[in-house]
Amino acid sequence: MGLVVQKYGGSSVADAEGIKRVAKRIVEAKKTGHQVVVVVSAMGDTTDELIELAEQVSPMPAGREFDMLLTAGERISMALLAMAIKNLGHQAQSFTGSQAGVITDSVHNKARIIDVTPGRIRTSIDEGNIAIVAGFQGVSQEGKNITTLGRGGSDTTAVALAAALEAEVCEIYTDVDGVFTADPRVVKKAKKIDWISFEDMLELAASGSKVLLHRCVEYARRYNIPIHVRSSFSGLQGTWVSNEPRSQSEGQQVEHAIISGVAHDVSEAKVTVVGVPDKPGEAAAIFRTIADAEINIDMVVQNVSAASTGLTDISFTLPKAEGRKAIDALERSKPAIGFESLRYDDQIAKISLVGAGMKTNPGVTAGFFEALSDAGVNIELISTSEIRISVVTRADDVNEAVRAVHTAFGLDSDSDEAVVYGGTGR
Ligand code: ASP
Ligand code: MG
């Protein structure tokens, strides 16, 4: 029997009952003869509460102290979980990210893992313990400061440990039964996907699907670690994310599916730079300004310029959280770049259709736009990749648009309605 890494999210360990329930599941896995390493998130909304607390004492808390604070959330859950397992008569030891050998760069609040040296974890499990590791945190290689990996980073911790320990599988336990064809909180008729490729899962994650973090899927693909996303509240099989379908029936199912799913994202805003001279170098100057402010942008469109004025508008989307920074940076460069004004709009949503099958099936784009038009939804921006089409719409239209597209592509399930077991969706 091999080694499994299991990760439990905040909603699975939201209270003492949840911790005891999860402890039982972990012990079951151990009883089947596996070595078990568990990665755990902070209880419920603890991380959000800690962030709010920090903001009450300082509007701009220093990165180092902020990380020190946030990692406390996972320390609470890891210790409680180890206690609960011991109470069931099994051996368990908890470890911080630093103790588990999660080494990161020095970028506080969104550090990247650069190495994992899990010697202590290996020793602990070889001695018969279940090792419980605090997710979402590490220690910087230079400076030896405590870092965090960015919101939702426990998934990445789990996959990174699974890779370093050469685990058979990384099981991600959450509050839904797996990856669905749309967010089950929005589309009651969303279907659980049995198997999905790393490629499609990466696009879904990049398009706003929150069930798995983009970085985590990227890491899993790089080290070829199969991920099994499943509910900690039910015993059902969840969704396997891997390179190849695991069985012939999964393979056939995938061949018939053109579209993997519909994702939506309301975390972005749109900036329009109005009255940009239509000459070489202008777009370069605008996006150099944004890049120098270390802001990642998503979609970009440039309007046709009015012949009479020789001026054009350029719009792009970016995370709302970076909106202020982008506007400030552009305002500072306004004299050098020479545009007329800036518009900022945070009432937008992005809706994306994802599936490798669209490469070989004509009409997907047309069908997508028809579904939106039938639902009376206006499209503001469009962008595509080989296996994805995304549009920006008004935020108010998002739920209706997602449902319309889901139905139009035949993704609605005719049986069970998707179950959301926990979490506040916060
Ligand atoms: N507790 C952290 C968060 O809420 C990390 C995680 O849940 O993965 O973002
Ligand atoms: Mg979380």
Image (cartoon, grey):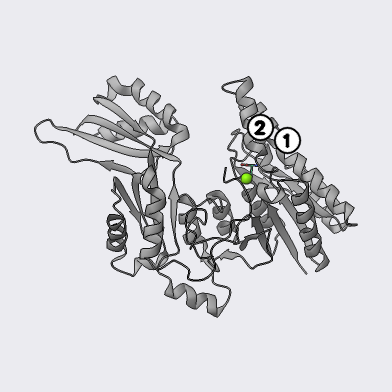
The amino acid type, in three-letter code, at marker 2 is Leu
Q: Can residue 389 be seen in this view?
A: yes
Residue picked out by circle 1: 72
Dots 1 and 2: beta carbons under 8 Å? Answer: yes
Horizontal side of residue 346 vs 278, given as left or right? right
Quarter the N terminus occupies: bottom right
**CB of mark 2 near ligand 1 (< 8 Å):** no
- List x then y, in percent, for residue 414: 48, 71
Density class for disc 2 (Cα within 10 Å; few <14, some 14-19, many ≥20) is some
Quarter the C terminus occupies: top right
Instruction: Give the mark nearest the N terminus, 1 or 2.
Output: 2
**CB of mark 1 near ligand 1 (< 8 Å):** no
Would you place residue 9 above or below residue 365 in this image? above
* Camera-side residue of 139 and 76: 76
Residue picked out by circle 2: 50
- List x then y, in percent, for residue 62: 61, 24
Which numbered mark, 1 or 2, is in the foreground of this view?
2
- List x then y, in percent, for residue 403: 41, 57
Residue visible at 78% across and 59% down? Answer: 26
Residue visible at 43% across and 39% down? Answer: 296
